[in-house]
Image (cartoon, rainbow, N blue to C red):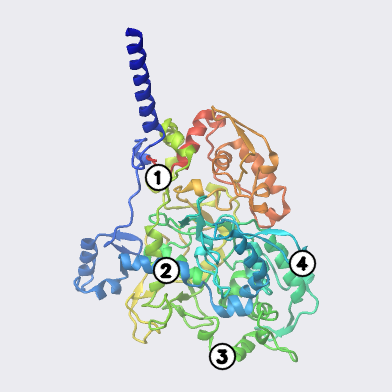
Amino acid sequence: MRYRRTLFLFLISLLVSFLAFFISNLLVRPDAVVATSPLLAPAPTQAIGSYDYFGRSLTAQEAADLVRQKGLDPNSSTSYARIGAVKITSQLISKGEQIFFDRKIGDTFGLQRVLGFGQGITKVIPELTVAILKQGGQATSNLKITLQKNITLGSQTFPKGTTVSTGLDIPRGGVLPIGLKVSGDVTCAICHVALSPKGDQLKGIPNGDLGVPLLIALAPNSAAGFARLNFNPLDAKYQGNGKTIVDSAGNLVRLPDPQIFERAFDDAVLAVPYGHFESSPDSINNTTQIPTVFTFKSGPYTAGGEFAVGPFGGLSSVNNGVHSSEINLLAAAQRSAETIGIDREVYLGTVLQNAADSKLRLPEGPPVKPSEWLRQVAPNPTQAELEDQVAAPGVGSYPNLKLSLFTYNGLVFSPNTIKFDIASGRFLFAANAMSAWQNSLVPPPNQTLQNQQALQSGSVERGAQIFEQAQCVTCHRSPFFTDNLIHPIAEIKSNPARGESRLAQNALLVSPKIYTLNTPVPIPANAEVIDVPTEGVSDSPTTLPKGLLPDGGYKTPSLRGLYLTAPYLHDGGVAVRKGALQVGADGSFSIADPTGLGLSGTLSQAIPADPADSLRALLDRSLRTQVIAVNRSNPALQLSNLDGTGHEFYVDATTGFSPSQQNDLVNFLLALDDNPGSF
């Protein structure tokens, strides 16, 4: 009896111990705290009812005091709009999300009638339809199509039967890719919304394997975007059957052969890895990977940080640029002579001679000035290339607009106040609404088994200590893990191409101004104007932000959401494919598959990069050296200046850290989600 009783008590004790282990280790509550380092505390969020004042977040009382200081009535909502303050409301955020998901970007005239983006998509509509139907309502983060005919892009022919990755995301039950409309228009969501392994939409996460090069090369006149890459249309190698035009000085100039030029440009576009894009018309090959839009307190914006002033600290300037300066193909001709050394007429002629809409192509017969021809076929620019765009105050009149730190082509996207358009409203409404929505986003929780185990084992907590010991906190300060500064190229040592993007515009800047945010559109003659503050951002209102001059620079990115944003650095060059490394229990690793290193082994093949192993390449000097060597051995990547160089701050044996400490740091970085200390 005594033996049976002892055995019974032993079994009961064992069962209790098992249940305790099961509950504590396998059924961790979502709000259970498992790490306590201050670095792992949740970041503050944008408060409903607060105000944005040119990047400063103000309480309602602080905003009222500011309005009162400026001699206005704080009890009137108009007073806040008159000083440039934006109230954060649920309604504004909801509207911003709607615009982000549903409102097309770009002007129909340039993107569709000149470049022919929609026509390009039409080429593969049968393939897209079949592929979506085969999904049977299931989600996919990379829709793959099988070509039903031969397709030639540039100098490459893709035979019938070829399987092609598009990177387009199809939600559960969806009949269209996220961000792609039936008309062939695209919205912001095509690049900045991804799908989780379960098919859930992750708002703000980059669609890192999007086939941007494919979608652009499909367009019949993709070379209309020649200023985005290092293409001189007057180079002798492009000569042939191009039109002769009259340039700005009255000289006759032979344009490039449209077929030769298009083929060469498409080849260059197709050399760009998936998940990368190029938007600035600076004639520099400086593609960058699609960024996150977890924007609250993470400015200045874009890789170089040049969008740094205006409402929401430059974020509204970015949103404006996406719909205007960064995508308006024809407006870039205004300052093409000063910025890229191409005469305005040559620029317009090159863009128009092979226009997707044959009615816009330069005429047969005697040479013409392309700008004069443009106004013949499209007499009203506000119904053509200036669709839904107005000139900022103080920049002059189109087509001779000056530039400013707020708008790098002088234009502001702001649809007519009473137009039937979800983006319509008072001046700058759409850009500000999108900013409010983007600032409301936080990285989704990292619910991977790897993160759960790393938190429970203490690896994440130890990694936080390494983050401090290695002095990463010097630039990546919690809770947003950025110092909000632009660091000169000489300091950061990344490939200089992207950081130099705006340098040619510095001499063209005028003081940034906007209309008051209660101003209706069209802009009335007596509209009130606000000076955009630049103190602390640039040395003067007419110089680029600090850190960019004289040679260019890069802003310190936030580290939040890293587990969903591989590969790393602005160019995505620090990339390692899953399975390329063999990692031991102590964090030490060896290269198991050299073909999985660099962009050549990942996004150039539409293969995602592994977050943990790509972070190891960021932190480990020896591994990074090998990744850079692979990138530099690929001529296509060198054409786009994608090499993974820079940020030479290593946490490895050369700086006194063990493999296990490096591994802990990797786990810490992967844990930086909405609530890093919890699972």
The residue under label 1 is: 477
The residue under label 4 is: 150
Q: Residues within 10 Å of mark 1 (few under 14, many from 20)?
A: some
* Closer-to-camera residue (249/270): 270
Asked if the residue under mark 2 is in contact with the one under mark 3, i.e. CB atoms within 8 Å, the reply is no
Label 2 and label 1: CA atoms lie apart by: 32 Å
Asked if the residue under mark 1 is in contact with the one under mark 4, i.e. CB atoms within 8 Å, the reply is no
Label 1 and label 3: CA atoms lie apart by: 53 Å
Dot in front, 4 or 2: 4
Figure check: 173 above or below 121: above
- Name the residue type under label 2: Gln
Asked if the residue under mark 3 is in contact with the one under mark 4, i.e. CB atoms within 8 Å, the reply is no
Dot in front, 2 or 1: 2
Q: Count how many numbered circles sit on residues in the image.
A: 4
Give the mark, 1 or 3, whose residue is nearer the N terminus.
3
- Name the residue type under label 4: Asn
- Name the residue type under label 3: Pro
Residue 632 x %, y %: 69, 48
Q: Report the residue at 23% width, 61% height from top.
A: 62
Secondary structure under the numbered disc 3 in the rendered image? loop
Dot in front, 3 or 2: 2
Secondary structure under the numbered disc 2 in the rendered image? helix
- Name the residue type under label 1: Arg
570 displayed left or right of 430? right
- Of all residues, the one furthest to the right in this rendering is 240
The residue under label 2 is: 98
Give the mark, 3 or 2, whose residue is nearer the N terminus.
2
Q: Residues within 10 Å of mark 4 (few under 14, many from 20)?
A: few
Secondary structure under the numbered disc 1 in the rendered image? loop
